[in-house]
Structure formats: structure tokens, C-alpha cells
Image (cartoon, helix red, strand yellow):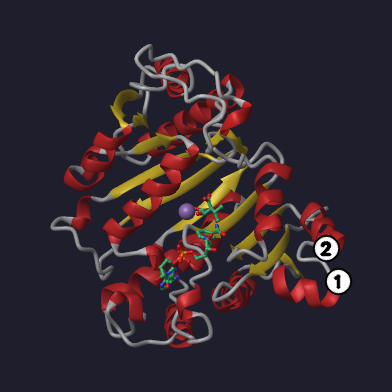
């Protein structure tokens, strides 16, 4: 087909309060894009008796990509499907401060990097069981005593495959090369717990390191994940493209978001070989649901990532510039950024600059 088809799944709690205005803004910006809406969670339960009905799955499948709000629990099966069902293997989470963002950092203007997160493996999807099932599983550390089978407790499985590590690493290198062309340093940084997990994180490190070495234009550095967390705060200017495992990426993306001014500001995109979906880093913000004050910036910037991905570069830039102007003006700021603008006041301000 000639047009781009986007499925919209608004999600739970406060998420629809940012998804719906974002869609109407994207429609104005790029009228050629077709948007179809699909229900999930509580609403779908009421209409179809199922939080993730076959109709919603079919709408996701029929589209080129999905714009997703967030799951606060009821829409969790949709998120599961968008990741594992559609094999969106890499999660891109840009971390960039803009003038006007309420950052707690001393030099926030130095923060401009991108987290490339494994979106499929590690401790996801959850695989837990009773410790008694694996009671005698040997640890690679000789000083560690496996608890006796009778011990009450549970274990969780953490998985890392070469295939996944290779494609995440390849994505990170492509991104670093693209950014190099735009004047960034072309530096890939890996963070992992390779010191205590040689076979999973150690192997991940080896593969990322080797993949970066195939590109002489790129430089490479690696840090243990705890030290990398410190560097994100102490020296963010040393970061360009940061490759992380699934749960490390989950946690550090929120920390990174906090460094620029909070979850209201952080977009993300999940890419697979034949599907993509776009969602903010934040969750469903249940504590502010229904108040009309959720910051739509993260959602709008996720929309800009969608536009960029599908060739609407100019429209994406217009949206980003409009947002940047609202923040640099500083007259109309959302509540989480120290202002008192409602979600719709803020959207109106963005529209006026568009
Ligand atoms: P959260 O990101 O929803 O909220 C954390 C805090 O940040 C809250 O105080 C919230 O009000 C605030 N916040 C988040 N987004 C904001 C925005 N755009 N504007 C202003 N303030 C914002 O995380 P949580 O409270 O830990 O989790 C709530 C639910 O969301 C949980 O069920 C969690 O599993 C889920 N969650 C889903 C996703 C997703 O669907 N991708 C991501 C993260 C969390
Ligand atoms: C995220 C969220 C999800 C994750 C949850 C909702 C499963 O926190 O997208 O960052 O842990 O990946
Ligand atoms: Mn998260």
C-alpha cells in the first residue's frame, strides 16, 4: 500500500490523556498517515470480555507500526505482544536535555546520548520457579553453596543469546555511525555485569566489543553497570551510544530521564526486522490519572521518532522545534516541569508554534 498505517493503542490510567492529543497533532502534521484505533485493558474487557481481544491483535498486525501509551497492568498483554509477538528486539531511548527542562544536574547541556536497550532477553519475559526445582544447580563460583532442595524460595532465569546480542550490537553501531555523520563522537559504550556473569553479560560484552571493532570509525568503551550508572551522572558528556541489557536498560533509562528533568520528557522506540512500536519511557502514571496534568512531551517526541522512522523528517523536525520553543520560552510549562499548564494548555502552546 502507498500510505503508512499506524495502529494506536492508548493503554491504561493517564496514558490516553497523552496519546489522544498526540494523535490529533500527528494527523495535522502528516495528513497522509492513516491512524486506526484499537482498544485494550479495561475498555476492551468491557466491550469484548478480553483485555487483549483478537480485534486489537489484528489491528496491530495490519498496521506498519503501533503508537502505544503505557500499560498500568490491564494492557500488559498488548505490551508483551508488541515486544515478543512482533520481535521488536531493540529499544531506543534518547536522553537529551533541552533549555527549559527542569534538570537537577549542574551542567545539563552536556547530556545528549542514546540508550540502546535489549528489548527481548535478560530476565524478560519472566521465567520464575520454585528453588526446589533447581536446588542442586551448580554456581560457577566455587565458594557458593547451592541451597538444599528443601529450601523454600524461588529463582528467576536470565537469558542472553548470541543472535540477540549481535543484532542489538549491530543496531548500536549503525546508530553511532549515523550520529557520527551528524557530528557526534561515534562512541559506543557498553555497560553490563560481566564481572560476575561471564557467560551471559560477559558474552554480551564480547559480542558488542567485536561488533564495534568491525567499524574503525567508531570508538569503544566498557564499564561495569554500577560504574556506568555513576558516569551517567558524573560525566554524561562522555556518552554517545550506550548499549545495555534489558533490565539494566529499564532501570538506567529512568535514571537518565531523571537527569534531564523527568519521565515526562523521555521518548522511546522499539524496532524489529519487520515491525516497530513507539511509546514513552514512562508508565501509565496512575497517581495523576484523570487530573489533566500529565506531560505529553515524552509521547509527542515518541511520535516524532515515528515520523522520522517513516520518512516524515521535516514534520518530525517541525514538531521537535515547536516543543523546544515552548520550553525555551518557559511561559507555558507542565506541572512536572515547575509550571502550572494543563496537558491541553501545553498542547495548545505546541500547536501555536507549529
Ligand atoms: P510511571 O512512569 O507511570 O510513573 C512514575 C512517576 O512519574 C509518577 O509519579 C508519575 O506521575 C510520573 N510521571 C510519569 N510520566 C509522567 C508524565 N508524562 N508527566 C508527568 N509525570 C509523569 O511509573 P510507575 O508509577 O512506577 O508505574 C505505573 C504503572 O506503569 C505500573 O503498572 C508499571 O508497570 C507501568 N509501566 C508501564 C510502562 C510501559 O507500558 N511501557 C513503562 C513503565 C511503567
Ligand atoms: C518499560 C517498562 C516495562 C519494562 C514494564 C511495563 C514491563 O518499565 O518499558 O520501561 O520493564 O520494560
Ligand atoms: Mn521502565
In the image, the residue with mark 1 has its CB under 8 Å from the nearest atom of ligand 1: no
Left or right of 256, for residue 212: right
Q: Nearer the viewer, residue 198 or 299?
A: 198
Return the residue at label 2: 53
Left or right of 72, for residue 84: right
Could you tell me residue 101's position as x and y percent? 28, 68
Among the 4 quarters of the image, the one containing residue 21:
bottom right
Could you tell me residue 261's position as x and y percent? 29, 64
Q: Secondary structure at mark 1?
A: helix
Residue for point 46% across, 33% down: 172
How crowded pointer 1 is (Cα within 10 Å; few <14, some 14-19, many 20+) is rated as some
Task: Name, please, the residue furthest toward the left.
Answer: 106
Left or right of 262, for residue 66: right
* For residue 13, above or below residue 4: below
Question: Does residue 235 appear in the picture of this structure?
Answer: yes
Task: Name, please, the residue furthest toward the front.
Answer: 150
How crowded pointer 2 is (Cα within 10 Å; few <14, some 14-19, many 20+) is rated as some
Tell which circle, 1 or 2, labels the residue nearer the N-terminal end: 1
Q: Nearer the viewer, residue 129 or 98?
A: 129
Q: For the residues marked 1 and 2, what is the alpha-carbon distance in whole angstroms?
A: 6 Å
Among the 4 quarters of the image, the one containing residue 2:
bottom right
Among the 4 quarters of the image, the one containing residue 326:
bottom left
Residue for point 32% across, 39% down: 240
Could you tell me residue 34's position as x and y percent? 74, 66
* For residue 321, above or below residue 25: above
Left or right of 312, for residue 211: left
Could you tell me residue 146's position as x and y percent? 46, 21
Check if mark 1's residue and mark 2's residue have beta carbons within 8 Å.
yes
In the image, the residue with mark 2 has its CB under 8 Å from the nearest atom of ligand 1: no
Q: Secondary structure at mark 2?
A: loop
Question: Does residue 318 appear in the picture of this structure?
Answer: no
Q: Which mark is residue 48?
A: 1
Amino acid at each position: 500500500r502507498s500510505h503508512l498505517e499506524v495502529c494506536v493503542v492508548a493503554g491504561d490510567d493517564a496514558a490516553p490523556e497523552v496519546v489522544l492529543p498526540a494523535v490529533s497533532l500527528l494527523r495535522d502534521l502528516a495528513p497522509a498517515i492513516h491512524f486506526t484505533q484499537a482498544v485494550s485493558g479495561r475498555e476492551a474487557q468491557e466491550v469484548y470480555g478480553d483485555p487483549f481481544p483478537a480485534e486489537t491483535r489484528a489491528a496491530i498486525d495490519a498496521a506498519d507500526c503501533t503508537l502505544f501509551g503505557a500499560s498500568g497492568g490491564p494492557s500488559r498483554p498488548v505490551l508483551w505482544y508488541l515486544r515478543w509477538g512482533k520481535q521488536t528486539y531493540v529499544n531506543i531511548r534518547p536522553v537529551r536535555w533541552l533549555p527549559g527542562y527542569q534538570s537537577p544536574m549542574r551542567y545539563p547541556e552536556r547530556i545528549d546520548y542514546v540508550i540502546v536497550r535489549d528489548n527481548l532477553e535478560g530476565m524478560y519475559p519472566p521465567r520464575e520457579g520454585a528453588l526446589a526445582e533447581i536446588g542442586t544447580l551448580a554456581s560457577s563460583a566455587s565458594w557458593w553453596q547451592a541451597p538444599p532442595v528443601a529450601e523454600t524460595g524461588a529463582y528467576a532465569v536470565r537469558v542472553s543469546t548470541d543472535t540477540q546480542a549481535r543484532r542489538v550490537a549491530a543496531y548500536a553501531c549503525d546508530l553511532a555511525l549515523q550520529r557520527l555523520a551528524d557530528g557526534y563522537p561515534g562512541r559506543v559504550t557498553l555497560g553490563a555485569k560481566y564481572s560476575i556473569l561471564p557467560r551471559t553479560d560477559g558474552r554480551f560484552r564480547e559480542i558488542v566489543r567485536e561488533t564495534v571493532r568491525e567499524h574503525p570509525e567508531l570508538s569503544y568503551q566498557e564499564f561495569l553497570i554500577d560504574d556506568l550508572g555513576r558516569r551517567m551522572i558524573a560525566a554524561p558528556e562522555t556518552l554517545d551510544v550506550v548499549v545495555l541489557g534489558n533490565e539494566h536498560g529499564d532501570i538506567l533509562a529512568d535514571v537518565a530521564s531523571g537527569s534531564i528533568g523527568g519521565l515526562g520528557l523521555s521518548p522511546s522506540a522499539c524496532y524489529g526486522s519487520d515491525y516497530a512500536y513507539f511509546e514513552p519511557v514512562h508508565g501509565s502514571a496512575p497517581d495523576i490519572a484523570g487530573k489533566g496534568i500529565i506531560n505529553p512531551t515524552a509521547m509527542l517526541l515518541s511520535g516524532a521518532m515515528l515520523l522520522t522512522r517513516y520518512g516524515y523528517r521535516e514534520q518530525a523536525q517541525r514538531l521537535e522545534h515547536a516543543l523546544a520553543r515552548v520550553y525555551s520560552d518557559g511561559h507555558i510549562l507542565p506541572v512536572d516541569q515547575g509550571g502550572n499548564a494543563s496537558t491541553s494548555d501545553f498542547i495548545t502552546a505546541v500547536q501555536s508554534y507549529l
